[in-house]
Each structure stands twice: as C-alpha cells, then as structure tokens.
Image (cartoon, grey):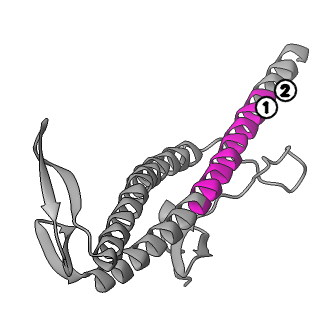
C-alpha cells in the first residue's frame, strides 16, 4: 500500500525566497513547461486551467504590491518634509530666532503662528496616535523611518520584477500549451482525412 501524494495547492508549489534589505518574502515561482510531442513512451497531457489560475493569482499579488509601492512612494516625501521641518526648528532655536509658520486649521483655512524656543515636536504616528519627542529624538526616529521605508521600497521593486518575470513565464507556458493543443487537433484531423 502506498500513501497517496499530498494535495498541493498553487501557493505551496515551488516557493522561492526573495531576500533583499533584511526582509524576506515568499513568492511562488513558475516554471517553463514544454508539452510533450507524442513521442513513444511519453505521456501527453491536455492543457490544464491551473496555469490561468496561477496567472490570475500573480496579477492579484502584483496589484497588492503596487498598492503598497504607491503608499511607500507617498510616505517617503512626507518623512523627508518632516525631517526638514525638524532641522529648521533646530536651526532657528540655535540662532535664537522665532519661526513664523502657516498651518492648516481645516480644509482651505490657514493660520499663522510664531514658534519661539521649541524644545520638542509632536509627531503623528497614525492610528489616532500623536507623541511628543525632543527635536533630537524626532530626528533619529524620522531618519530610521525613512531608511526603513526606502529599504521596503527596494524590496517591493525587486518583488515586482520577480512577479513580472513569473507572469511572463506563465503566459508563455499557456501559449505553448494552446499551440500544442492546436497542433494535436490538426494532426488528428489530418489522420482522419487520410483514412
């Protein structure tokens, strides 16, 4: 008695670990397949819909990664702007000057403020959380957040390149299977016509 092979799902087939920037993602890799040409002893299989399903799943993962990439690309300029503001506050404090700033009260309504001798800044962390930091701590935190965001963006770009390669491989495999099926039908029709 032999144990039946385990049922494999698409996401568990041939995993490739993509490492970059200290982070790792597990993305399934596709393999190029060539349909058998009916040689003696070879088993020819009809086209399977699993390739199309795999392609759809690659496209879904790609959409999620593209959304993450857009979020990071919007987040990086905001962090850089915050770093510039903290640096300006520190410079004005060192010179002993007051900083005059315009800030938005609500949509389309601005106010002017005079900031004198500020030792701390409040950073919006998200999820309705704002914390007060000293200027040096805020600078360190923002620099580490900027480095992490850039590293994550590099990982995402690498993952997107990998996914596009896998989509191309899957599309070529689908085309080969389709062409093989057309060839098999034509050869059967020619044999039927000859007899």
In this picture, is 50 found above or below 122?
Answer: above
Is residue 12 among the parts visible in the rendering? no
Image coords of residue 5 (percent x, y): 54, 74
* Local secondary structure at mark 2: helix
Horizontal placement of 52 versus 71: left or right?
right
The residue beneath circle 2 is 187
What stretch of residues is rendered in magenta? Answer: 158-183
- SS for dot 1: helix
**Which residue is labeled 1 in the image?**
184
Classify 144 as above or below 153. Answer: below
| Residue 154 coordinates in the image, percent (x, y) | 57, 65
Judging depth in this view, the residue of 122 and 102 nearest the camera is 102
Q: Does the stretch in magenta take in 10?
A: no
Query: Eyeballing the image, is 142 above or below 48?
Result: below
Query: For mark 1, does the 10 Å Cα neighbourhood hold few (<14), some (14 to 19), or many (20 or more) residues?
Result: some
- Which residue corresponds to the image point at 57% horizontal and 55% vertical from the top-left? 160
Can you see residue 156?
yes
Relative side of 3 to 96, left or right: right
Q: Which image quarter: residue 149? A: bottom left
Q: Is residue 181 magenta?
A: yes
**From the image, which quarter does the C terminus lie in?**
top right
| Of the pair 21 and 177, the residue shown nearer to us | 21
Tell me where residue 90 sits by quadrant.
Answer: bottom left
Q: Nearer the viewer, residue 112 or 122?
A: 112
């Amino acid at each position: 008695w032999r144990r039946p092979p385990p049922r494999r799902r698409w996401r568990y087939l041939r995993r490739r670990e993509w490492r970059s920037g200290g982070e790792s993602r597990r993305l399934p890799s596709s393999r190029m397949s060539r349909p058998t040409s009916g040689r003696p002893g070879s088993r020819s299989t009809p086209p399977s819909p699993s390739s199309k399903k795999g392609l759809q799943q690659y496209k879904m993962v790609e959409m999620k990664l593209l959304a993450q990439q857009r979020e990071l690309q919007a987040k990086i300029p905001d962090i850089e702007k915050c770093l510039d503001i903290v640096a300006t506050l520190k410079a004005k404090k060192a010179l002993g000057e007051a900083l005059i700033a315009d800030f938005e009260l609500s949509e389309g309504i601005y106010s002017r403020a005079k900031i004198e001798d500020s030792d701390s800044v409040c950073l919006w962390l998200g999820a309705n959380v704002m914390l007060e930091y000293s200027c040096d701590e805020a600078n360190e935190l923002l620099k580490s957040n900027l480095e992490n965001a850039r590293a994550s963006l590099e990982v995402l770009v690498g993952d997107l390149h990998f996914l596009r390669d896998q989509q191309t491989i899957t599309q070529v495999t689908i085309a080969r299977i389709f062409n093989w099926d057309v060839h098999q039908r034509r050869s059967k029709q020619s044999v039927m016509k000859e007899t």
